[in-house]
Amino acid sequence: MRDLAERFKVSFSFVASLLQKFYLNGEIAPKPHGGGYPASISVSGEAFLKELIESQPDLILLEIRDEYNQHFEAVSRSTIDRTLTKLKITRKKKTLFDSRKYTQENQEMRRVYENNLESLETKALIFLDETGNVRNLTRRHARSPLGTMAHSENSLTRGTRISTLGALGISGLLTAFCYEGTLTGFLFAFFVKEFLVPVLTSSNVVIMDNARVHDDEDAIAMIEATGARIMFLPAYSPELNPIEHIWSKVKNFIKKTVISNTEELYQALADALETITPDDAQNCFQHCL
């Protein structure tokens, strides 16, 4: 028995107790759980919390506790916290949306768009969009010893805004154009002529949102001259554009880079765009289509 105790790193008395139990009962299974203390919040209370969170998801714990205590026997904030954890209801960053997205008219536009998309080959699709970056873009959370602030060097001046306009296909980021300021009709037409048209074929379908600058007559004419078709996304539906996820990856790259001037921001953008892989593009397409 001492050899068993040493082998399994337990006490001699523990092994002796198990053997005695085996000789008496023919098994060494543990006794049933005694049950412990009853839950402070009943099943009906849990249902109330679920409905409350569904109707007001941004309530803080104190507000949830106060609302609960108006209808049930009073409990503490920590009890509410444990119950929400048990129900797998977690606190997270809110995803904001425009309520106009869910109008009947726009829902019909989404159905038409999705039906049209089903008839197209994925390899023919090219999604356009633009994003903006400034040199003080940085991660907003960091770690430090308990009781101390987490400091990080960063320019407090926004500086010049550098925007990037790109085209994404299933094979990867096909082309990108970085420029200072915001997008204008002239810049969009320049991008189409110098960057987009060279990578287009007559089988392509160019998809973009319905921003006013995307409706530039010269740009539209140049795209259609290649034989490619144009489709517009439904209004208020950026989640349908795979390139949005590419821009998120680019921004995350920029956030972890210390940038002190515009030239360094341009270089960081170039480095970030180089990290986009065909796998990234395929994953983004799969997520949005």
Image (cartoon, grey):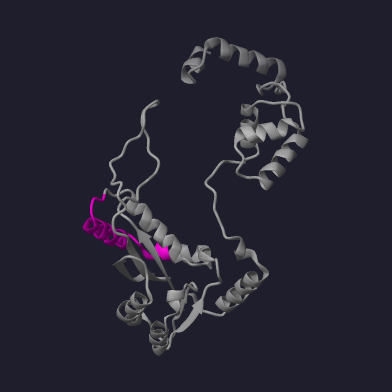
- Nearest the viewer among 41 and 59 is 59
- Numbered disc total: 0
Q: Position of residue 56 (x, y in %)?
A: 65, 45
Say above or below: 86 vs 174. Answer: above
Q: Residue 274 location, x and y as percent?
A: 30, 62
Which of the 4 image quarters holds residue 203? bottom left
Residue at image x 65%, y 67%? 103
The reply to whether residue 95 is in sight is: yes
- Residue at far top of view: 13
Q: In which quarter of the view is residue 77 placed?
A: top right
Residue 6: x and y in percent read 47, 16
Direction from residue 176 to residue 227 in the image, left or right:
right
Q: Is residue 260 magenta?
A: yes
Position of 82 compared to 206: left or right? right
Point 59% across, 12% down: residue: 16
Please tell me which residue lies in front, 97 or 33: 97
In the picture provided, is 63 more to the left or to the right than 286?
right
Q: Is residue 126 visible?
A: no
Residue at (28% x, 47% y) in the render? 155
Q: Is residue 50 left or right of residue 195?
A: right
From the viewer's perspective, is residue 183 above or below residue 205? Answer: above
Magenta stretch, main secondary structure class: helix
Q: Which residues are magenta?
A: 259-281
Q: Does the magenta portion include 189?
A: no
